[in-house]
Image (cartoon, helix red, strand yellow):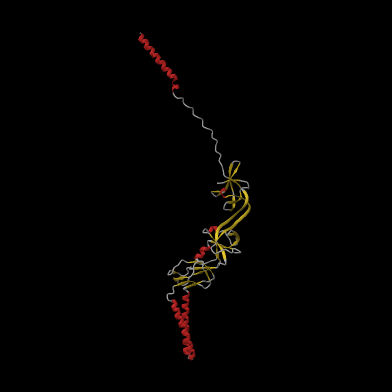
Amino acid sequence: MSHMLKRSGLTALSAALALSLTLSGCSLLPEEEQALKPPLVKPAQESYRTVVAEKGSIKKEIIGTGYFESVSSAISQFTSDGGRIEKINVKQGDKVKKGDLLVQLNMDGLDIQLKEAEVAVIRNKMSLKQAVQSGDEDLIKIAKLQSDIEKLKYDRLMETYNSKQLYAEIDGEVTFVEDLDEGDFVGAYQPIVIVSDPTALRVALRSDTSADLREVNVGFPVQLTYSNVTYEGKVVQTPSSAPETLNQQLLERYSKTVFIELPAIPEDAKIGSFVDIRIILQQRDDVIIIPRSGLRSFLGRTFVRTLEDGKVREIDVETGIQGSVNIEITQGIEEGAVIVLQ
C-alpha cells in the first residue's frame, strides 16, 4: 500500500513539473526581436544645369594659321624631253638674278657639236667673202646657200643646247628645289626650281576641308596678327573665284586655299613666316543667344528645354548664326528664359 502511494506521488510530481515547463517554456528561449520600420526617404529632386538666355553679340568666323608667300613666282621646268641631271647650281634660300643658270642637264657631247657648228658658220662667212671678191655669181650663190645651211644647223643646235638648261626668269629668292642628284632623270614639265619675288607678298590660308572655306567671299575683311601686331587685310581669291588652269597641282592648291592681301607688308615679314588669321563670316549684335549645348534636335525638331516654376517644357525654336560656342535664337524664346543644358 505504501509503495503504491509513493509511486502515485512521483507521478503527480512529474505531471506538475511538466505542466510547469509547458507554461514557462517560452521564457527559456531567446526573445524574438521586433522588425524595425523602414526609414522615411525623401524623393531625390532632379537637378539641372541651366543658363539664362541673354541678348548679346554673336559672330561666325574662321580662325586659323596662314603664311606669307610671294605673289610673283616663276616655276623652272624642262619643256622638251627632259634628261639626266648634270648639275643644280642653287639651293633653297639663295638669291638669284634674272638669267642666272639654275639647272644643267647632261649634254651628251652637244656642247662640242655646238662649237663645231660655230666654226662651220665662221668658215662659210670667209668662203662667202672670198666668193664676193672673185665676182663669180655662181660661187657667190653657192657660198651664200652654204652659209645659210650652216647657220640653220647652228641655230637648231643652240636651241637644243638651251633646252638642256634652266635659267632664272625673274630676280628673287629660291623657294623650292626638287631633291635630285647628279644622274637622276627628270621628265618634261617636272618642276625643278621655283624662284619667288620676296618684295611682293600675300598671305595664304589653306584648309583640307573645303566646307570651311565655302562661305568666304572675295572682299571679306580679315584680321591678321604677326609678331604680336594686328593688321587689317582682305580676301582677294577663294576656291570659287580661282582662275582656271590646266596645271593639276595648282588646281588642287587653289581648291583648298584662300589668299589675303595687306595694304602694307610688315618690314620683317618673310616668305614662309606664319600669321594668325581671323575671318568674320557673319556677325549680329543685340540678339538672343544661348550656348550650343542648350539646343536640341530630334526627329526633325529643333527645340530647347526651359525650366519654369520647377517644371521642364520643350519649346520649338528657330536659329540664326551658329558660332563656335553660342548660337543665335531668332524665334521661340525671349530674353531671360532659363535654358536646360544637355
Q: Position of residue 238 (x, y in %)?
A: 56, 62
State the count of labels.
Answer: 0
269 above or below 331? below
Residue found at the far right of this picture: 286
- Is 290 left, or right, of 22 in this rendering? right
The residue that appears at 61% across and 55% down in the rendered structure is: 283
Residue found at the far bottom of this picture: 135
**Quarter holding residue 338:** top right
Q: Position of residue 305 (x, y in %)?
A: 58, 45
Q: Position of residue 321 (x, y in %)?
A: 59, 53
Residue in front for this viewpoint, 19 or 318: 19
Residue in front for this viewpoint, 318 or 118: 118
Looking at the rendering, in which quadrant would you find the N terminus?
top left
The residue that appears at 39% across and 12% down in the rendered structure is: 9
Q: Position of residue 134 (x, y in %)?
A: 48, 91
- Residue 283 appearing in the image: yes
- Residue 241 appearing in the image: no
